[in-house]
Image (tube, rainbow, N blue to C red):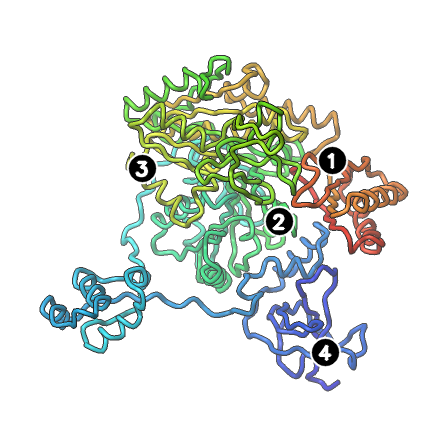
Amino acid sequence: MNEKQKILKVAINVPINQLFDYLSNDITVKTGQYVTVPFGKRKIVGIVCAISSESDIHPSKLKPIIAADNEIIFDVSMFKLLNFVSDYYHYPIGQTIMSVVPIRLKKNLNQYKQSELIYQATPILSREFIEQLPIRQTRIRKVAEALLKRDIRQNEVMKLVSNWSGCIDQLKAYGCVKSKKYEPEIPQLAAKPPELNKEQRTIIKELLKIDNYQASLIYGITGSGKTEVYMQLIKNYLEHKNTQVLVLVPEINLTPQLENRFRSRFPDKSLVSLHSHLSDIERLDNWRKAKSGEARILIGTRLSVFTPMPFLKLIIVDEEHDISFKQHDGLRYNARDVAMVRAKNTNIPIILGTATPSLESWYNANYKDNKYNLLKLTNRAIKNSILPKIETILVNDKTKYGISRLLVDAINNRLKRKEQSLIYINRRGFAPVLFCSNCNWHSECKRCSSKLVVHAKTNKLKCHHCGFEKELIHSCPDCNSSDLRPLGAGTQKIEEVLTRLFPKASILRVDRDTTRSKKSLSLLYEKMNKREIDILVGTQMLAKGHDFPFLTLVGVLDADNALYSSDYRASEKLFSQLLQVSGRAGRADIKGEVLIQTNFPNNPVFEAIKKNSYESFVEKLLQERKQMDLPPYSFTAILRVESKQLKQGEKFIMETAKYAKSLKNNVIIYDPLRPTIERLNSYERFQLFFQAKNRKELQGLLKKLRFYMTEHPLVNRIKWALDIDPIEF
């Protein structure tokens, strides 16, 4: 091996927990570059994680790389973070690294986004010129007519006619059209920031004193102006050169409104967003802007926590309690926790903000040696704005349509006052099950231990777990009876009921079925602010972060479902959901009202919601957790096993549990169980729960267990995954 022939340690997207050695092939390669390598009979892309002169494999048996790209994907600090994540979440290092690389790079489609053009008419283009064009050239005439009225962006021309590029080329040949790079118009003046109240000013002053790693929890009631605190803080940070800020949000639906607010406040600062509503090439383009340092502000969902940002000086995690920060398959990380590690590694401040802190964050801020800096916002930011009045309605009062008379009257009052209402039901579809009243048959998914949901709009029965769907049937497959009834209610049914009750009202349903396009959420905000919508019907997509100034009533339906859960976090999640959705009411200076339909109006969760007493409620939950040694007083993990064959999955998890219990440790290992959904997408499911007072002991056991499972005779016939710090059971 000559001097130039280095050994490259390459991360590859395969389920083996190691890096693979390749020869550099006399190509100059740096750590962090991506390379094309032979792997078996395939050619795949990998990332160079290290360069060495030694290998455990003899150089004669090593294969050379095929090609290398000059772009550096990750720097040393990002590799440090990714190695920690791989180790902590027990996920193969190659798959960990490749799971956070933009998809176009993994496919070796590394083109940069092409600039969009805008087309303009020259003085030659006139009404007389168009009249002289041959009548058969209808498409060219149509484009010319449009250009005569105004300048047209490239994507508009594409929608105008087919063979649009040919039409443009022909008009250019005539000399009547010219083009230039499209640059979005940027407001010359930034939006004027609102006047801060005393609490906001105090918090900003305190946060600006921090210039190294420190976690701060901003606990602020809904509408208390947490976002304004973020923006004022960011303004101060961006006054310094070479400074970047990362803002993490839990869901896509929060991104458009937040992005618009930030753009209007920072018109002269480069801002990008990263979320799944962007195309692959848009995501790659925005990712590169953040990686180069060009983008000063990045707003993104959970995967954004892994975006390279060379000048990162501040991380903000909005709605830190939200379970959407947790990834539930593949690399099962929690973006909030990873953000904490990243901030510590780079020695920068991190801010967590929420109206309902997670129990872990509350514990860290109040009990664990004040690990977090606790800051409170106890008043609403808008003057004269007060918290909504919250009441429960016993569902005995409800009509046959599922909406109580009291709630119907409240909606009617809002319509008369030209105010808006939100009806919240956390279940999409028309009804959760189709039922035969003659023989008790009900619609079940053949792939999952779950019911097929009735979707009346599309005339389908759908499984919300595996995606299976079929045509809606009109007679029972067991007894042939035509007496099939949809039981329960989802957003579609409530929308139908409200349309019947309020035929003149403008009603909009917002759930995953109606918000698939990029523009749907932006249009929602536009219509709500223009008061073109009277009643919103939606799921938890509408429960947090949204600011609708004319929305004064929130009605909550079927809140009781969460009370029957076997998940020990159920009451915490329900309280958070209800308080967040309640916070949508009366955010301006118009008084808000929240009505919650329930069979159990005196349940502690509803009592705490009515009093808006998060602190007393969370203290009771902490006492319960302490008595049972549950998080945050312990550390937990779940081994999740899936198998096509029931007996194979059962054998694997029983033997794994037996081996784990044979090891000397202080970890509590429970007996294997079937989860609530025992079968998912044709896989039989099992889980094994671990609980320990010491994180290090739990991690040590899981490392031994991981090695045991990779050597198990059934390992190629089952799927297994370790879920660290699980939040769903």
- State the separation of the CA atoms marked 1 and 3: 46 Å
Task: Give residue 387's position: percent from left, percent from top.
Answer: 42, 24
- Are the residues at dot 1 and dot 4 in contact (C-beta closer than 8 Å)? no
Report which quarter residue 11 is drawn in: bottom right
Task: Tell me the amino acid under the disc marked 2.
Answer: Val
Q: Describe the element under mark 3 as helix, strand or loop.
A: helix
Task: Tell me the amino acid under the disc marked 3.
Answer: Asn
Earlier residue among tags 1 and 4: 4
Earlier residue among tags 1 and 3: 3
- State the separation of the CA atoms marked 1 and 4: 47 Å
Rendered-image quadrant of the C terminus: top right
Q: Is residue 693 visible?
A: no
Packing grade of label 1 (10 A; few <14, some 14-19, many >=20) is: some
Task: Tell me the amino acid under the disc marked 4.
Answer: Lys
Per the image, the residue denoted by label 3 is 529
Q: Which mark is residue 338?
A: 2
Earlier residue among tags 4 and 3: 4
- State the separation of the CA atoms marked 2 and 1: 19 Å
- State the separation of the CA atoms marked 4 and 2: 35 Å
Task: Give residue 192's position: percent from left, percent from top.
Answer: 31, 43
- Are the residues at dot 4 and dot 3 in contact (C-beta closer than 8 Å)? no
Packing grade of label 2 (10 A; few <14, some 14-19, many >=20) is: some
Packing grade of label 3 (10 A; few <14, some 14-19, many >=20) is: some
Q: Is residue 650 visible?
A: yes
Earlier residue among tags 3 and 2: 2
Give the mark toward the camera: 1 or 3: 3
- State the separation of the CA atoms marked 4 and 3: 61 Å
Earlier residue among tags 4 and 2: 4
